[in-house]
Amino acid sequence: MNTFGLLLGIATLFIIGLGFVWVIRAEQRLGYLWWPYFMGFGLLLIAASLFLRSDWASALLGAVGASFVWGSTELKEQAIRAEFGWFPFRAEKIEPPFAEVIKKWPAPDL
């Protein structure tokens, strides 16, 4: 019996669940302007997963990277939800490096 798929599915479900939490917390503390950094980090994790020998490590790192890429597209929507009062809103956020440049870019949307 091969349980690789079942266990990988459960682990991926857990990773996706944590993705919801980090998106809420990241937007609350940092703001949505950090999306390029989260997307870049996720893409780096996905690229790194290509070079791992272990199937487990490669699959889990790829899932974490994909969660970061997805989360980077959700930061803007989470900011809107926080402004509506659906989630805690914090006005004091940490500005990312190159914030003025990032403000000119359209936030990604899936």
Image: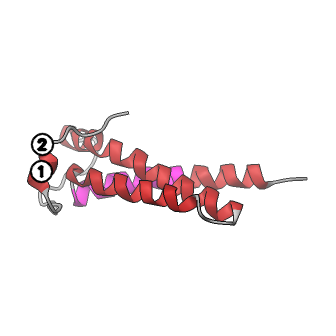
Task: Give the x, y percent position of residue 79.
Answer: 23, 44
Q: Are marks 2 and 1 in contact (CB under 8 Å)?
A: yes
The amino acid type found where label 2 is placed reads Lys
Q: Bin the neighbour count of mark 1 within 10 Å (Cα to Cα): few under 14, some 14-19, many 20 and up.
A: few
Task: Give the x, y percent position of residue 13.
Answer: 59, 49
Mark 1 secondary-structure assignment = helix
Q: Quadrant of residue 82 in the image?
A: top left
* Residue at 13%, 58% in the rendered image: 98
Between 8 and 99, the residue placed more toward the observer is 99
Q: Is residue 59 above or below residue 85?
A: below
Does 97 sit left or right of 19 as displayed? left
Seen from this angle, which residue lies furthest front?
51
Residues drawn in magenta: 15-30
- 105 in magenta: no
Mark 2 secondary-structure assignment = loop
Task: Give the x, y percent position of residue 64.
Answer: 51, 56
Q: Which residue is denoted by mark 2 in the rendering?
A: 104
Q: Which residue is denoted by mark 1 in the rendering?
A: 101
The amino acid type found where label 1 is placed reads Val
* Residue at 18%, 41% in the rendered image: 105
Q: CA distance from mark 2 to mark 1?
A: 6 Å
Does 3 sit left or right of 63 as displayed? right
Say which quadrant the C terminus sits in: top left
For the stretch drawn in magenta, the main secondary structure is helix
Between 7 and 56, the residue placed more toward the observer is 56
